[in-house]
Image (cartoon, rainbow, N blue to C red):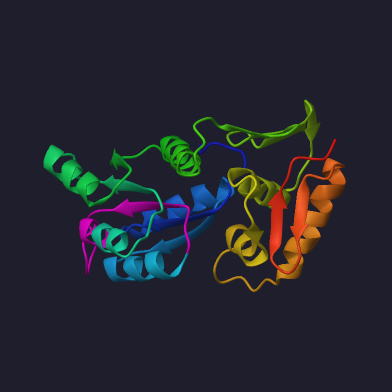
Amino acid sequence: MPLSGFGLMRVLVVEDEGQLCEDLRQVLEHAGYVTDTAQDGLEAVRLGLTEVYDCVVLDLGLPQMDGVSVLQRWREDGMGAPVLILTARSRWSDKLAGFNAGADDYLVKPINMDEILLRVRALIRRAAGHFSPMLTFGPLTLDTNSGRVTVSGVPLALTPQEFRILEYMMHHPGRLVTRSGLVNHVYDRNAQQSSNVVDVLISRIRRKLNMDIIQTVRGQGYRLAVPKA
């Protein structure tokens, strides 16, 4: 069984084996991630260079363009999302080629879905400069593995969408987070959502937090700010 709990952000799965691709998508979405898929190298290149992802799971044996070439193209064009290579190739030369192309982690098939989730979570945390599953900001603590949020030690009940918004902001403390950026990390790329949805979610989170920790930047978005004494 896949790990339970909430995730956040956008993950791209590039896998040409149809059933495995669908299984990965379902597991990641069940864990709370917004997930896009591609089943050939050319589509993977297009998505990686036109959409914003927080992590990519990439198979090496792809039709039209192999995974190493896809990764090289992404890196040459400045795509910096962490990449977890997923492949049946176990030779050291294949691993070396993947890491030299810009991979951040490597898993050999057959895979364990729990391990996929753990590694995706770890890559996202590290890319944001966090090396622990526990995120803290002022009196606020968020456990990315369990989906538990506390304020000064008191548990806080959030919906999955509220959790994703807050977790994304806590991965980027003190930085401006735009409304469109939040929409992209809560809904998949085909969903038709307005920025007003984010405003409503932010308002609900503020009421539950009962503190001035989410600052509005007029006309731009929001920022986590330490509450004034």
Of all residues, the one furthest to the front in this rendering is 229
Q: Nearer the viewer, residue 40 or 99?
A: 99
Q: Please, which residue is most extreme toward the top here?
A: 153
The x and y percentages for residue 143 are 63, 33
**Is 6 situated above or below 49?**
above
Instruction: Please tell me whether residue 53 belongs to the stretch shown in magenta.
Output: yes
Q: Nearer the viewer, residue 150 or 228?
A: 228
Residue 110 located left or right of residue 157: left
Of the pair 63 and 163, the residue shown nearer to us: 163
| Quadrant of residue 199 within the rendered picture | bottom right
Toward which corner of the image does residue 209 lie, by quadrant? Answer: top right
| Residue at point 73%, 50% (across, down) | 162
**Magenta highlight range:** 52-70
Q: Image point 33% across, 64% down: which residue?
A: 39
Q: Is residue 225 left or right of residue 169?
A: right
Q: Which image quarter is the C terminus in?
A: top right
Asked if 75 appears above or below 27 in the picture, the reply is below
Residue 96 lies in the magenta stretch: no
Question: Tag count in the figure?
Answer: 0
- Answer with left or right where residue 109 lies relative to residue 80: left
The picture places residue 159, in percent across and down from the top left corner, at: 74, 48
Answer above or below: position of 14 versus 145: below
The percent position of residue 113, horizontal first and vertical second, equals: 43, 40
The foreground one among 169 and 87 is 169
Q: Position of residue 16 (x, y in %)?
A: 30, 60
Question: What residue is shown at x 80% (from left), y 49% (from top)?
Answer: 205
